[in-house]
Image (cartoon, helix red, strand yellow):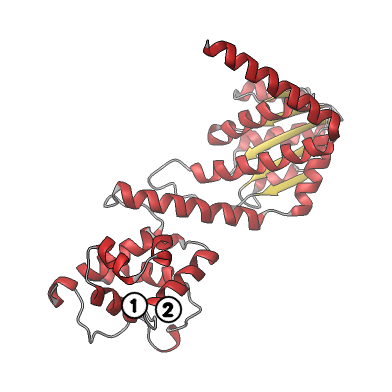
Amino acid sequence: MSTAENGRTPTEAPLQKGAEADPARNILDIIARALPDLRRGSRQLAEFILAHPRFVVDANLADLARQAELSEPTVLRFCTMVGCGGFRDLKIRLAQSLVLGIPTTHAALSFDDTPRSITGKLFDFTATSLERTRNSLDPGAIEQAVDLLAAAARIEFFGFGASGIVALDAQQKFPLFGVPCGASQDSHQQLITASMLRPGDVMFAISNTGTTVSLIEMTRIARERGAKVIVLTGSHSPICQHADVALIAESLDNTDLYTPTISRLSALVVIDILSVSVALRRGDDHARDISDMKKHLAEIRSHAAI
């Protein structure tokens, strides 16, 4: 393959110079930021690495060159260009970057993406976002929420749109604990429900933005009625002002090209954490009840399949 085909000359200066040539910098972020200025061969390799960093970590030089459809010298020149001391150093720094998390700069979708690159981006972006959610959650707030839910006489889940889907998922899980639960999607019905709450009840409001005016009003009404209020939101947002417990589940939503599934997945994981925690508090008798219920469900499914 010729120099022209590779898109870079062997003597070209590296992308990092001076203080910027810091081996502690996220190599994926370095590559992603340089991408718009790269020529064809280098850009082709950069896009492959960004879409498949885990493959590159496990690959040898020949494997990467073959999969990226480039020559081995091209790969080696690229390693030097991005500030690595060779292919082995590139793999080490990629492994470090994966531990730190995939940078959002290369995870954004574009109209040039292929199904192959979209697959890599969305899996990496989702994993990184969930890790961010994990790090943003306050363990103390989780404990407080579990205390309230475990003692609740009634639980009402509130949410609109994507958050409403999370509310329905929660409403499916918590009746397993013998507690009446609701999850209305209608704003008028939600107002009626909030107005009828009483001490001992729990309102669980879900809103990634935390700025939905009607939902904030519901939390205020529920609090005035003496109910406890738990909110699950993506940041320290206005909905937190009436909350007894605020669960902050930060995520990395990209709403430019697709529906914000990331925030929904983060919220669903939090609901799982809460439901499992409440279940474990209820002891062996409850575990046996759940086991019996699952057994009956399995029998019903078996009969339905006949």
Left/right placement of residue 65 relative to residue 258 reads: left
Badge 1: few (under 14), some or many (20 or more) residues near its Cα, within 10 Å? some
For the N terminus, the quadrant is: bottom left
The residue pinned by badge 1 equals 79
Left/right placement of residue 3 relative to residue 193 reads: left
Badge 2: few (under 14), some or many (20 or more) residues near its Cα, within 10 Å? some
| Relative to 95, residue 202 above or below | above
The single residue placed furthest to the bottom in the displayed view is: 18
Residue 89's disc is 2
Kind of residue at badge 1: Cys
| Relative to 160, residue 260 above or below | below
* Secondary structure of residue under mark 2: helix
Residue 289 placement (x, y as % from top left): 79, 24
State which quadrant residue 204 falls in: top right
Give the residue drawn at x 58%, y 11%: 303
Q: Earlier in the sequence, mark 2 or mark 1?
A: 1
Give the residue drawn at x 82%, y 35%: 150
Question: Could you tell me if residue 226 is visible in this image?
Answer: no
